[in-house]
Image (cartoon, rainbow, N blue to C red):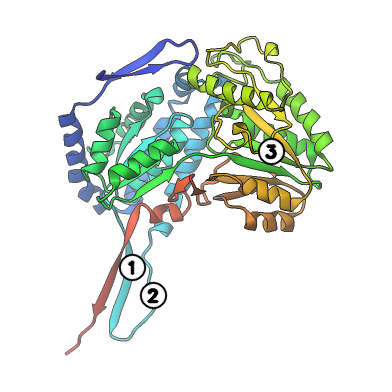
Amino acid sequence: MSNVIKCVSPVDASIYAERPIASDEAVKQAFEKAKAAQAGWQALSIGERAKYCSSAVDAMIGMRDEIVQELAWTMGRPVAFGAGEVGGFEERARHMISIAEMSLASVFPGPKEGFEREIKRVPLGTVFTIAPWNFPFMTAVNSIIPALMAGNVSVLKHASATILIGERFEKAFSAAGLPDGVFQHLVLSHDQTNHIISSNWCDMVAFTGSVPAGRTIEQAAAGTFTPVGLELGGKDPAYVRNDANIAHAIENIADGAFFNSGQSCCGIERIYVHEDVYDEFVPGFVELVKGYKLGRPVDQATTLGPLIKASAADFVRGQINEAVEAGATAHIDPADFPMDEEGSAYLAPQVLTGVDHSMRVMTEESFGPVVGIMKVANDEEAVRLMNDSEFGLTAAIWSEDVAAARAIGDQLETGTVFMNRCDYLDPALAWTGCKNTGRGCTLSSLGYEVMTRPKSYHLRVVTS
């Protein structure tokens, strides 16, 4: 097995960076160092921790221009959109810092004569974050900042495709003067990652990634009683009701389906359109998608970059070809996107109609620039089809009727219900899912609950 992690650029398949995998002894020492640092970090006030974390956010923002280029080369994000990743990181980090004092406050159950009673929120210890490549800063910050603000220490293992992100976090916290050992990043193999979890070296695992990888992490944690937060796959639906603003729906659903080349956990991967507006929606949607510019992400004009690797693009090509062979209609001619070549990471966007749930493209996570559109007769049919999935991360409803959207949302098996928007995380709301999308919660005040444990104080006051 190689002792080096290589970051292969989807831009041109060159090796953009490589880093040595940490030795087993270095990994063990890192977790020992984290454990030793935790008590001192916990002893600081929330306000003191906030100063360190806010300074680290400032330092990360100062690296924005470098990060934009780095994202283009390492995971294909067009430079036109790269600054949005940094902006999203800042929004989430600053919100979680701002609500920490309130979210971590003690709970007092009320007076009881002769007793003082209190429930404190105390840190778990060492939080091990395993972050993905597709939104590499925004996914990592979901657990790192809340973990630190709650008095935990943090160890980050980032995806091989974005291995340099750990170094960015380390530079930011170092610039903020964070005490030694409170944040560390490690370059790890899969075997080392599993060993860390199964050896009970960490006190919580925060993972974002695939369903199979999530199962592996659960198996590694079995018997350790280590809490595991899992954000896994998605096949998020959108429903366009007959009272929707169609122009608004087209613009926003297209962005939700094709931003980041469709490589978003909460991106729109299937669309259900009421029969009354279907014939208006589909041509407008197709026309907008035809206007995307597929190209090298380092070019300012590019609006659709490559997928993370050629095999990911070929997987999506396979879904599209199977659907067409089964009777679906493909509305985009790949020839209009010259960089789309079989066996490359560059893939033209595709819109399919005539699809149904017998096709993989409507049931299996695509994680690429393709979306299927189905006509539905009413809300009831839309709800049934939206729920016909092994996943449940988000669901989006386009309508001018808030009451109807709420009623539909109450029936949906999902973590977040959107109305007239999609593919966005509001840090004031709990980010969670159901079914094979995983378990646990990040962001909002509820995100602090998973980073802490309750500790009760039951004090009898005895007087002479």
Does the CB distance between marks 1 and 2 fall below 8 Å?
yes
372, above or below 461, in the image: above
Give the mark, 2 or 3, whose residue is nearer the N terminus.
Answer: 2
Mark 2–mark 3 Cα distance, whole angstroms, equals 47 Å
Image-based side of 242 in relation to 387, left or right: right
Residue drawn at point x = 24 percent, y = 19 percent: 3
The residue beneath circle 1 is 119
Q: Nearer the viewer, residue 340 or 95?
A: 340
232, above or below 344, in the image: below
Which disc is residue 109 wearing? 2
Q: Which amino acid does label 1 sit on?
A: Ile
The residue beneath circle 3 is 271
Which disc is residue 420 wearing? none
Q: Nearer the viewer, residue 150 or 394?
A: 394
Q: What residue type is labelled 3?
A: Ile
Tell me which corner region of the image, top left, top right, bottom left or bottom right, holds residue 298.
top right
Mark toward the viewer: 3 or 1: 3
Mark 1–mark 2 Cα distance, whole angstroms, equals 8 Å
Tell me which corner region of the image, top left, top right, bottom left or bottom right, holds residue 342.
top right
Give the mark, 3 or 1, whose residue is nearer the N terminus.
Answer: 1
Q: How many marks?
A: 3
Query: Can residue 184 be seen at all in this image of the molecule?
Result: no
Residue drawn at point x = 77 percent, y = 50 percent: 378
Q: Nearer the viewer, residue 306 or 147?
A: 306
Mark 3–mark 1 Cα distance, whole angstroms, equals 46 Å
Indicate the secondary structure of the residue bearing disc 3.
strand
Q: How crowded is mark 1: few (under 14 residues within 10 Å), some or many (20 or more)?
A: some
Q: What residue type is labelled 2?
A: Pro
Residue 83 in the image: state x and y as whole percent: 53, 27
Residue drawn at point x = 29 percent, y = 46 percent: 221
Residue 414 in the image: state x and y as whole percent: 57, 50
Indicate the secondary structure of the residue bearing disc 2.
loop
